[in-house]
Amino acid sequence: MKLPLRKSAHAVIQKPRRARIMKRASSDPPQEGYILRLYINDSTSKSLLAIKNLNLICEQHLGGRYELEVIDIHKHAHLARDEQIVAVPTLIKQLPPPLRKLVGDMSDLGKVLFGLDLTVR
């Protein structure tokens, strides 16, 4: 399935309900993209580390073919409840299938790549 990914700056774009980080290399044609949601508790260092680690992994291994949505569970508890989030940080890979959930600070590169169905380059 080909997903049209939107261009944006490398900064967090504030939406009315959630913060989104969307990246795409402007000269690259659309490819199969990843839709990721990272549920965090904004006040913990583990959540901040997960954001940092995941941004690095996505840039190195997905090359701009991803959309990362960062959701603070305190501001949007209903979203966390709907996804049955019981621990944070939790990453949900929505696309491409299969759906996967990863819990932790995303510091174990091998486990994160396995969860995203990627291999080490």
Image (cartoon, helix red, strand yellow):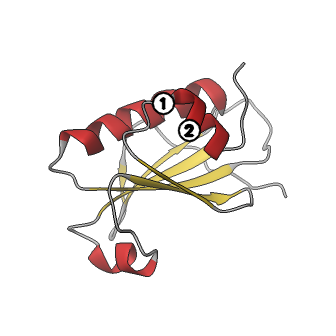
CA distance separating discs 1 and 2: 6 Å
Provide residue 71's location: percent of width, then percent of height: 35, 60
Report whether 56 appears left or right of 32. Answer: left
Q: Is residue 65 in sight in this rendering? A: no
The reply, left or right, for residue 20 in relation to residue 118 is left
Instruction: Please identify the residue farthest to the right as the structure is shown.
Output: 1
Residue drawn at x 63%, y 35% as measured from the top left: 113
Q: How many marks?
A: 2
CB of mark 1 within 8 Å of CB of mark 2?
Answer: yes
Viewer-side residue, 57 vs 18:
57
* Residue for badge 2: 112
Residue lying at 78% horizontally and 47% vertically, measured from the top left: 32
x 14%, y 50%: residue: 43
Q: Amino acid at mark 2?
A: Val
Query: Residue 75: image x %, image y %?
Result: 22, 69
Rendered location of residue 64, percent (x, y): 62, 35
> Image quadrant of residue 50?
top left
The quadrant of the image that shows the C terminus is top right
Expressed as whole percent of the image width and height from the top left, the position of residue 80 reads 36, 72
Q: Which residue is mark 1?
A: 108
Q: Amino acid at mark 1?
A: Asp
